[in-house]
Image (cartoon, rainbow, N blue to C red):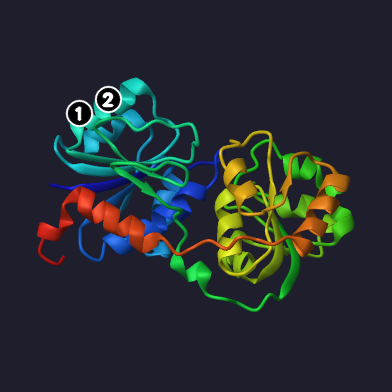
Amino acid sequence: MRYFYYVHTGHRIGLDRFHRAVAIVNELQKEIDITLLCSDFRIAAEAKEYGIKRSVGIDLVRNIPQIAQNGDKIIFDSEEINPVLLEDMTQFFSSFIRISDDPSDIKHAKESLISPYLCGEGICNALVVDERYFEPKPKTIPLALFFGDDDYEKDLQTHQSVFAPFRMELLMGFYHFLRYEEKLKESFVTVHESESYDKVIQESEILISASAQAVLENLAGGGQPVFLQRPDYSENFLPLFESLGIPIVRNYSSEQLSHGIKQAALNDYRRIDKSNNKVIEFIRKTFDLEKLKPF
């Protein structure tokens, strides 16, 4: 019996799912030998820097059964799912836990589900945010932008004039092109490399970001995030962010951005609870880990 966590990452979709994978895997590997499967070889190689003991890159989601064996157990965090793949995966794995951000999702009879929207039998209603982000940090950065870990089409460069008047700091993304910051530095007071992710997320008073995970992490630590809805990103988080009082900017517009920043200063944000323990206990129960000896 082996355990896996598959996460969809890459230069066109960013690392949001990877950040919550880190929060879950770092807890589970305290008691089981679990392998993180990444759809991008670069982050698979970097995973040890995040505390992950074992990670493997795979080129196609359909290749997971070439690594796993029938009857193994897996956590699956990806939008690549479809009815045929879901049926095959739930037949192949003895336990199949899927993480979903889709408010209109429906639970498959043979799967377990982690979702911020859904409730019911076999569903854990929770958000996954690493507990370290709940630790309050001094807000040394008044205003920052994290466009996301990916920007393959260089949209930030195209629209940087929208952000320039606000004199904000910029956090570069993990998948940004080499020397991309040279094209952007004139529009921002400070440019932080991607290695400063935690510092910028935790120390920004107002964080503008198209990364849903970064928005949640900033909110957890007492920040005042503004969600930038990129046209190339899913809108799945909009209902959640509206319920949390997070301002949403839907267009590359200085006027809308200005309005979002003003809202951030005035909004009554709803703080999120620490729910990682709830998620871990749900996984332990689903994987029947109570019967195992300590790893």
Viewer-proximal residue among 181 and 87: 87
Q: State the quadrant of the C terminus.
A: bottom left
Q: CA distance from mark 2 to mark 1?
A: 6 Å
**Residue 14 x %, y %:** 55, 45
Whether the residues at callouts 2 and 1 have beta carbons within 8 Å, the answer is yes
In the figure, 152 relative to 181: above or below?
above
Q: Amino acid at mark 1?
A: Gln
Quarter assignment of residue 24: bottom left
Image quadrant assignment for residue 164: bottom right
Q: Is residue 71 left or right of residue 138?
A: left
How crowded is the residue under tag 2: few (<14 C-alpha within 10 Å), some, or many (20+)?
Answer: some
Q: How many marks?
A: 2
Q: Is residue 140 left or right of residue 69?
A: right
Report the residue at 76% width, 54% height from top: 182
- Determine which of the numbered discs, if any, sits on residue 156 in the image: none
Q: Position of residue 162 (x, y in %)?
A: 85, 47
Question: Looking at the image, which is closer to me, 117 or 92?
Answer: 117
**Residue at point 17% right, 48% down?**
2
The disc at residue 91 is 1
Q: Residue 227: x percent and y percent? A: 68, 50
Work out whether residue 169 can be spotted.
no
Identify the residue under disc 2: 87
- Mark 1 crowd level (few <14, some 14–19, many ≥20, 10 Å Cα): some
